[in-house]
Amino acid sequence: MLASCLWIATSVAAFAQSTARLIVDQWRVEDGLPQNTVTSLAQDERGYLWIATRKGLARFDGVQFAPVSRVGAMDIGNLRLTAVLPDGDGTLWVSTYGSGVLRVIGDSVTRYSAAEGVPDDIVWDNAAAIAILAAAESAEITGPIGLRLNSTRRPSVSLGRNGEFRTVEISDDEDLSVTGFSNGERVVVFHWGQAHEFQLAARDTGTSHGVHDGEIEAPMPGKVTAVEVAQGEKVAKGQRLLTLEAMKMEHALTAPFDGTIAELSAAAGQQVSEGQLLVKVEASEEPSC
């Protein structure tokens, strides 16, 4: 027992002596960093250290920093980065906040967004909560608010952003804390210090027949350019059902929940009017306990 105590005391003393000899250097913007908040560090196969910040990327060679503000034709100097990962073959993967995932190979960069499966569901869920609260209150919300949404109903709302439209359902087991505002035509939600604006395409609070029961309607007049499902087909929440071309942009309409295509009223090449029923999804039955 005495020997054990002496070993511990000796180890602690040795550790204290070793840490006393440590030299700590600190680098900031004035030393070449793009921004002082570092979100990720990673070393590549050549020994370079890559630093992701809230305002761009930098490479450190052991002596100095080299900010990377542009890769090919893409300006990444103002992107808010969340992680960086070299994969060992010269490829650098960079995740961003709100701008997808970047794959960098030399001077070539490929961006992967929600269309390729990069998730951003939390921002859509928060916007839906704001819109549903505004509809339930039957009044405009013109200033920032905070709320917790607990409901035994499963209301949903149709939102659009950057050419994509989704019908977002708030399930009865979700407990959301969100901040934002709505004026009846648009929804702005604040998330991690950034504002995200959505178009309010359609909304339903669960009290009337509408998108809450899986009916997907055209958010605006346009032309159906692609139908990617068939009647009777099983679909997953967020899966693209069809594409609508309107206002010189393509809008993806997705499944609000897991289910089966119960009704398909749209065909490729068809002109549709605002509010016209395009497809109906029947929700999957909850597994019995």
Image (cartoon, rainbow, N blue to C red):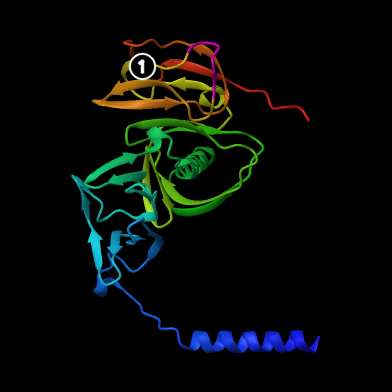
Q: Residue furthest front?
A: 3
What's drawn in magenta, residue-wise?
A: 230-235
Observer-nearest residue: 39 or 286?
Answer: 39
Magenta stretch mostly in which secondary structure? loop
* Residue at point 26%, 55% (across, down): 78
Q: Is 130 situated left or right of 151 in this image?
A: left
Three-letter code, disc 1: Ala
Observer-nearest residue: 93 or 186?
Answer: 93
Q: Is residue 288 above or below residue 222?
A: below
Is residue 219 in sight in this rendering? yes
Quadrant in which the N terminus appears: bottom right
Observer-nearest residue: 55 or 128?
Answer: 55
Q: Which residue is mark 1?
A: 226
- Pinpoint residue 138: horizontal percent, then vertical percent: 50, 39
Q: Name the secondary structure under disc 1.
A: strand
Q: Is 286 situated left or right of 210 in this image?
A: right
| The quadrant where residue 185 appears | top left
| The quadrant where residue 262 appears | top right
